[in-house]
Image (cartoon, rainbow, N blue to C red):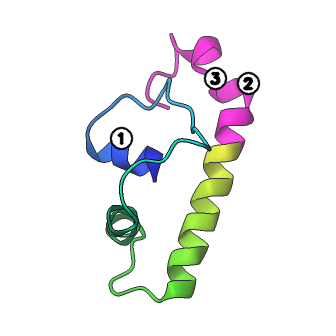
């Protein structure tokens, strides 16, 4: 949710890192962002769950990868 919210606001996500204990927005706002970005019209709960699970895995792996670190690739892959 934190990534999607910042993406919608036009923030630079290259240096953003998920904060597990940071509470942002309301449950309704979170659900709204998931519905907007899941790519399925009128998704079921399981489709939303699969979307959020996949997004979470991809973002966690991206944050952990040295190849996606803004310190490492900032000058060559900005916005990657």
40 drawn magenta: no
Vertically, is 11 above or below 55? above
The first of marks 2 and 1 along the sequence is 1
Which residue matches tag 1?
Answer: 6
Secondary element at tag 1: helix
- Indicate which disc residue 69 carries: 3
Q: Residues within 10 Å of mark 1 (few under 14, many from 20)?
A: few
The first of marks 3 and 1 along the sequence is 1
Q: Residues within 10 Å of mark 2 (few under 14, many from 20)?
A: few
Residue at image coords 45%, 45%: 3
Secondary element at tag 3: loop
Separation (CA) of disc 2 from disc 1: 22 Å
Q: Is residue 68 left or right of residue 41?
A: right
Which residue matches tag 2?
Answer: 66
Residue 41: image x %, image y %?
Answer: 33, 83
Vertically, is 43 above or below 14? below
Separation (CA) of disc 3 from disc 1: 18 Å
Residue 73: image x %, image y %?
Answer: 59, 17
- Tell us which disc is closer to us: 2 or 1: 1
Do labels 3 and 1 touch, CB within 8 Å? no
């Amino acid at each position: 949710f934190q990534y999607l919210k910042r993406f919608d606001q036009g923030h630079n996500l290259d240096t953003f890192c998920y904060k597990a204990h940071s509470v942002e927005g309301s449950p309704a706002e979170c659900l709204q962002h998931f519905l907007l970005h899941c790519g399925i019209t009128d998704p079921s709960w399981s489709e939303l769950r699969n979307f959020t699970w996949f997004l979470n895995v991809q973002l966690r792996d991206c944050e952990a990868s040295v190849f996606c670190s803004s310190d490492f690739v900032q000058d060559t892959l900005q916005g990657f």
